[in-house]
Amino acid sequence: MNAPLHREIPATLLDTHAALAQVSQAWDTDLVPRLTEYITIPAKSPGFDKDWAKNGFIDTVVRNAATWIEAQKVPGLTLEIVRLPGRTPVLFFEIEATKAKSTQTVLMYGHLDKQPEFTGWRNDLGPWTPKYEDGRLYGRGGADDGYAAYASITAVQALKRQNLPHPRIVGLIETCEESGSYDLLPYIDALRTRLGDVALVICLDSGAGNYDQLWLTTSLRGMASGTLKVQVLSEGIHSGDASGLVPSSFRIMRQVLDRLEDSATGRLLPASFHCEVPTERLAQARATAAILGEEVYKRFPWAHYDCEGSSRFTLPTTTDPLQALLNRTWAPTLSITGAEGFPAMQDAGNVLRPYTAFKLSLRLPPLVDAARVVREMKALLEDNAPYQAIVTFESNGGATGWNAPETAPWFEQVLNAASQAHFGAPCGYIGQGGTIPLMNMLSEGFPKAQMMVCGVLGPKSNAHGPNEFLHVPYAKKLTATVAQVMASLP
């Protein structure tokens, strides 16, 4: 149930100039050094490091964050590292309310696990070798999402320094997000009574349309992933001896994928993988398209080459800003993110390979149920295999997307006021193509809560890829904005 329309709109007492100055100093003197250290630690998510417990990197980043938080000596704060058997740990903190008669809770979320290294980093950069250059902190995980725990506490400190009353605040920092948050639901169940009456969720794990204003994420796509394998032989054989008689596993793979995707357009063929875009989201996308224009698609590192003064550029699927926004937020899309069964180029002899395996990453519209899609994918891909090849699809599970609840009037006004105070521009609204499994869990568990889903992943920040960076000037303003929003909670 949404806040009633006649509810009084709060006026913040926060000195916004002082808050921004305080958090900026904290970023320059403390947070940048802490995140520089964080980037050096290869705390890869368990989906990419099966020996994560033995390697100890996840434990290290959790302990480092916990030690730093405790050193801030935030009045009323208690903290613990919670561990369930066989699962990645979570960091849980609680700050008692100072606002009289307040029974509501603000939940602050982030994660400390990281994506793997990937290739293509600039020669002077690397995933575990941080570099601070022109306000950008390069390295894996700083922006996605190591900064969140540190920025959350810094925002709270901005309130404390001005002696402003605030509701109860809890923090939940997980270490399994990049693997789909499969460890998170057991922790939510274990900690549910300690979360309290959540009225506002602040999730600092999302993106920004530009670095010129606050951006509120209004939707997130879901994901269905898994490994599709086509096997035709028990071992590799001479291609001259067998080709023409033994079918290529790669050709069969193409045929099987054609059941799922129109390769000419990229459109996913099953109608059940699509959904209608809600009217409100369509209107917001139009407004955002007018703000961002061609930057919606120009922000990506397109491949191109110059030849005798001429240029040829890779073209996007559309150059219409509105359609581009909808394609990356409300359309299902298939990506092949990994492959097995292929030797390295220098080792590729004239051998017919026994199998081809692809890792499939299928992004789903926010309103499509991921578990159902996984079941339909398995049946679609495995049934009636060409040449009776062995075709298997083993899923890593699915995560249903998220569509934000209706924005309460007080929340919308506070967001615009905070964006104007710190950026000099109104709040923008944008859907994101990524997945944050927690948001759907929280919307179901706390249907009355407002959701402040935002982040520092703006143009060219390149989370998950090479040259990932944290835009520090934007992070400073976002941190101050978070403080203002918490101070304005009715």
Image (spheres, rainbow, N blue to C red):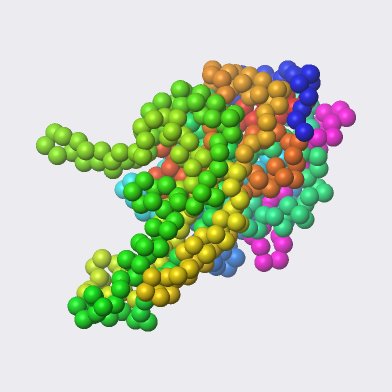
- Per the rendered image, the range of residues in magenta is 83-106
Where's residue 435, x and y in %? 56, 47
Residue at far left of view: 308
Q: Is residue 340 visible?
A: no
Where's residue 399, x and y in %? 59, 52
Instruction: From the viewer's perspective, tell me whether residue 87 is left or right of residue 32.
Output: right
Where's residue 395, x and y in %? 54, 63
Residue at screen point 60% across, 18% down: 421
> Which residue is at the front of the view, 438 or 187?
438
Establish if 58 lies above or below 277.
Answer: below
Q: Is residue 239 visible?
A: yes
Q: Which quadrant does the C terminus fall into?
A: top right
How many marks the image carries: the answer is: 0
Residue at screen point 67% across, 66% down: 86
Magenta highlight on residue 92: yes
Q: Main secondary structure of the magenta part?
A: loop
> Which residue is at the front of the view, 319 or 157?
319
Instruction: From the viewer's perspective, tell me whether residue 107 is left or right of residue 356.
Output: right
Residue at screen point 70% across, 55% down: 185
Establish if 256 lies above or below 452.
Answer: below
Establish if 309 lies above or below 360.
Answer: above
Residue at screen point 50% across, 39% down: 329
Quarter occupied by residue 398: bottom right
